[in-house]
Amino acid sequence: MHPSPVFEHPRAALSRAIGFALVWLILVGPDPASWIIGGPFVIGATLASLDLSKPRDQTLSLTSLAGFVPYFLRESFRGGLDVAARVLLPRMRVRPGNQTYRVRLQNPRARLVFIDSISLLPGTLSADLRGDLVTVHALDVDTDVLEDLTTLERRVAALFGESLSPVSDQTTAARSTANGAPAREAPVRSGARP
């Protein structure tokens, strides 16, 4: 007989129960009578989530998370301003194209957070991931996004407690402009500083 997932992973059970209780409070409000239904909902949802999605041993670093949230908000704001300025100010160049970046993160969850977070950087959007290479779509193909991507990757690595490998070889890949014509050969970027 297997022990209950609540006893196997008490911290995960507690954090999920708190999360579901907050969802209930947001949906229903603080009425104490609502907990006649809300209590069983929270317990059932917690048990179902523990059964359907087993807790993992790896946890996020709370100190890194506290540093990542302001960075995320600042970069999101900066990215929004950049796009708005390019739309509203015709003198700002819009020459879309792709750049390639070699991802050094190994943890699949860290890679997912990194790939999803690329879109918050000014004028960028993650377009494709093949192996270790991510294609980044930029609003201006001549903008070098290496520094922003390297900083983001370092912050995500710290968030998941992962140390990044040093930069390996610089292979080449083509950049292309909006109409598909090759612009020039550019090095595949691999997050410069160890």
Image (cartoon, rainbow, N blue to C red):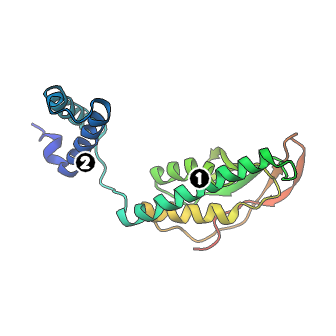
Quadrant of residue 143 within the rendered picture:
bottom right
Amino acid type of the residue tagged 1 in the rendering: Ser
Q: Residue at x 28, y 46 (%)?
A: 55
In the rendered image, residue 179, in percent from the top left (x then y), is placed at 88, 39
- The answer to whether the residue labelled 1 contacts the one labelled 2, judged by CB atoms less than 8 Å apart, is no
Q: Real-space Cα distance between discs 1 and 2?
A: 27 Å
Quadrant of residue 48 within the rendered picture:
top left
Q: Is residue 127 above or below residue 145?
A: above
In the image, farthest residue toward the front = 31
Labelled disc at residue 76: 1
Labelled disc at residue 93: none
Report the front residue among 41 and 1: 41
Quadrant of residue 41 within the rendered picture:
top left
From this viewpoint, is residue 25 visible?
A: yes
Q: Which residue is mark 2?
A: 15
Please give left or right for residue 23 compared with residue 77 in the image. Answer: left
Please give left or right for residue 141 compared with residue 51 in the image. Answer: right
In the rendered image, residue 65, in percent from the top left (x then y), is placed at 41, 60
What is the secondary structure assignment of the residue under circle 2?
helix
Q: Quadrant where the C terminus lies?
A: bottom right
Amino acid type of the residue tagged 2 in the rendering: Ser
Report the front residue among 57 and 139: 139
